[in-house]
Amino acid sequence: MTFQAPHKAVILARGLGSRMRKEAEGVTLSDEQTKAADAGVKAMISVGRPFLDHVISALADAGFTEICLVIGPEHDVIRNYYDTIDKQRVTISYTIQEEPLGTANAVLSAEEFAGDDRVLVINSDNYYPAVALELLKDVPGSALVGFTREGMLTKSNIAPERIAAFALATTDADGNLDELVEKPDEATIARLGDDAVISMNCWLCTPAIFAAAKVIPPSARGEYEITDAVRRAIEDGDPYAVVKADEGVLDMSNRGDIASVVEALGDSGVRL
């Protein structure tokens, strides 16, 4: 099956934000930031503008103009905001994930939005630079953007010890995803070698992801994980090309991340 250049993106914004709700010693927030952090709505924390504005603006820069936000039933603050602001480059729709049953379940809620098209699937608490997303333009099928360790160490706001715990991906002889190891230990990191790239959950998925998401079992923590759905899709004949990006991703997981994100994005323009 031949697909047109990807232009749809699904942003997973259903998370409960439990880490963001926790107080952080020595971190001072504005009243607006505190309100969003207390609610656990990481994507709406202001860094001059809501963090999610920057995420969506980068998507638009990379040619992703149809956006679907996966939200919870209680997330009226997100819907009310995006329904009322001016949007010139993107259209924004919503799908409800009724229960927080994991990332694959969240993706499944966007099946109607995807239709017969490929969709980019990303986290709402990560900022992916447009230059990395643009690498997906010429990929014919499914793909993972793999970030180099050097790019993450030098161009992200994430501490090296946190980066060391992120999932690592390797490729086969055809450049497709071979092994994906989450929370690798030191022995595994050494075994996978310097060519392994870091997965920051930046996936380009064909509609095969939905069939896979419907049949995978829950993980050990009782959730349906997108990584398991990807593995099942690959088993069923939908390979994932690994596109290497020598870039960094900004993370907005907890209150200690906010100042570094403001420093990185505060002066950058946003056009939705």
Image (cartoon, helix red, strand yellow):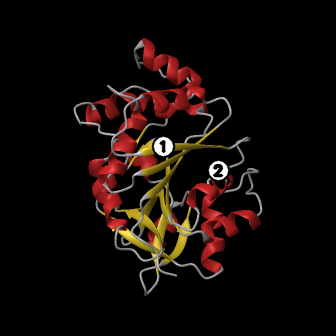
Q: Earlier in the sequence, mark 2 or mark 1?
A: 1
Rendered image: mark on residue 11? none
Question: Which circle, 2 or 1, is nearer the viewer?
Answer: 1
Q: Quadrant of residue 27?
A: top left
Instruction: Give the percent coordinates (x, y) of residue 94.
Output: 58, 42
Kind of residue sitting beneath label 2: Ala
Q: Nearer the viewer, residue 165 or 41?
A: 41
Question: Looking at the picture, does residue 153 appear above or below residue 174?
Answer: above
Instruction: Give the percent coordinates (x, y) of residue 78.
Output: 53, 31
* Left or right for 23, reference 223: left
Q: Name the residue carrying label 1.
A: 92
Q: Nearer the viewer, residue 236 or 246?
A: 236
Kind of residue sitting beneath label 1: Ile
Residue at (55% x, 57% y) in the render = 183
Question: Which residue appears farthest toward the bottom when viewing the image?
Answer: 173
Instruction: Give the percent coordinates (x, y) of residue 159.
Output: 38, 43
Q: Name the residue carrying label 2.
A: 106
Q: Secondary structure at mark 1?
A: strand
Whether residue 75 is visible: yes
Q: CA distance from mark 2 to mark 1?
A: 17 Å
Instruction: Give the percent coordinates (x, y) of residue 91.
Output: 44, 45
Labelled pair 2, 1 in contact (Cβ < 8 Å): no
